[in-house]
Image (cartoon, rainbow, N blue to C red):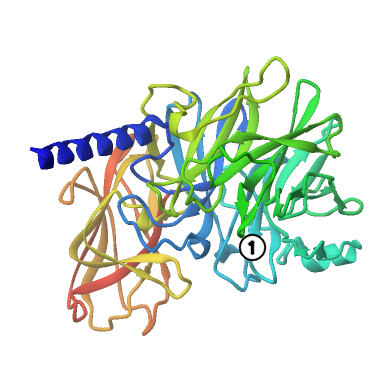
Amino acid sequence: MQKIQVVFLSILIAFGIANCLNAQQRLTPDYLFNSDPTTHVIDSKFWLFTSHDQVTVNFQGPEDYWHNIMDCQAYSTVDFIHWKHHGSILSIHDFKWATDFKLWDGDAGIAANGKFYAYTSVPSQHFSISVAVANQPQGPYNDALGKPFITHDTLLAHGIPLKKDGQEFGVMSPVVIYDKGGNPYLLFGQFRVFAVKLKPNMTEMEGKIFEIEIPLKGGEAVEYIEGPMINEINGKYYFTYMTYKNWQGKNNTNFSNDDPYGPYIQYCVSDNMFGPYADPKHLIYPLDSAACNYAHCIIKHKDKWVLAYHVPFAGKQHRQIAITELTVNEDGSLQPIYPAKDKGIVPGAKIKLTLDAFAPKREAEEFHKRKDAIEERGLSQDFHLKMKNKGWLLFKDMDFKEGATGFKIAISCENCNISNAKVEFRLDSPTGKLIGEAPVNFTYWIIYYKEITGVISGVKGIHDVYLVAKGENGDAYGRLFNVNWFTFY
């Protein structure tokens, strides 16, 4: 009898934990991993830009997100319920000067000069910041300079040492903010916060880089870690950022014994945009004490202050985005947010996600389901899927709007004996309506992606799309070719 009671209690606890996690409204709860959100309102539409943990709920690879973030992605909505995923809009591979295959936090969709700009952290050359440009917010974005925009050497050239109080700081976490005159500034920095005014062309600095006075020490610990953001709310300036109660074994005195361990988003207030800022307070509490970090963004949309932030997925290093309303109290304080209790921007609503068929790139590993398709890291460390004969990848709810005329797909085939091989796109089942196909041939002895194009016809509106492999004479394991990404046009 006691054993039955223990089992029943365990079930209740598990059910309670599941309900607690499900209570939080996440953007892609059963699908994609995404992180480091920034937000913009463009033509009355709410846009969300994220870095991307390239595995998914359906394909959970190694928990090494430090080495698993290689691209930026975009989402848009008009009601916070119906979202469109615009796929990969910018990749580390778009920066030929980068020496490491990682693309970390940043900001995209910044409108200026009839174009849109993106700034990202590139962990190459001892950390640097890149700038890219596109003709539309969903990209594709292209390297605007052919070189880094800001590096550690840039700081030195502006008379800023790379270490202070024994702490070396990083050139990362870029975000664009605006002063009352509408002038853009780039805000960035890890362990220290810097700003620099941008010229109207958005690719050059106007004047010197300067440091913003913020809380740097929480006793023995570092108070400010990364992820800076400044918003003007009711005539005051709010500086928000990520920190920990305990950093590298040192306790932060801005936290009480009752505060749980883990990452926090903190905020400070000033009468001036560039500080000084002091007296930090908690804004977002930890969801998981083992979580490695938080990231967030705040923006005014219509009559609401909207807060986007990422949290860990099921206690792992994979992250997902939550979006909620930020409450500003009458005294100017910000209402704290407890992620496990956060019901989201539209409480009770189930998020509905469609995939933009015309995304710059739809990564192959973003499938919803698969058959006879095996993941493998390519030479550039991003994943591709090795396809067997009649193997397939399913992508649910892909929106073709009024129709597509063609497709482009990046494929590698190291098997010189392959024959009668082709890739097919079919609707609603692996044997459903054929809307496009193209032959696949030997590309090279090692992994070498070739972009193959084909005609698309007979499709409009929203459909499940199956990418199907066909062919003979696969390798020793029956594999025909590798699919890296695809798109329609």
Check disc 1 and report its element: helix, strand or loop.
strand
Q: Is residue 464 left or right of residue 335?
A: left
| Picture layout, residue 337 above or below residue 144 | above
| Picture layout, residue 277 above or below residue 62 | above
Instruction: Locate residue 270: give its quadrant.
Output: top right
Residue 68: % across, % down: 48, 62
Instruction: Locate residue 15: give its quadrant.
Output: top left
Q: Residue at x 67, y 51 (%)?
A: 226
Residue 189: % across, % down: 74, 54
Instruction: Locate residue 5: give its quadrant.
Output: top left
Q: Which residue is drawn at 82% across and 54% down?
A: 204
> Circle 1 sits on which residue?
122
Q: Is residue 137 left or right of residue 197?
A: left
Residue 151: % across, % down: 76, 65
Q: Is residue 481 left or right of residue 315?
A: left
Q: Which residue is drawn at 59% across and 28% down?
A: 336
Identity of the residue furthest to the front in this view: 2
Q: Which residue is drawn at 36% across and 65% down?
A: 384
Amino acid type of the residue tagged 1 in the rendering: Val
Using the image as rendered, state which of residue 123 and residue 42 is in the foreground. 123
Identity of the residue furthest to the top in this view: 330
Residue 432: % across, % down: 17, 46
Identity of the residue furthest to the left in this view: 1
**Label 1 environment density (alpha carbons within 10 Å; few <14, some 14–19, many ≥20):** many
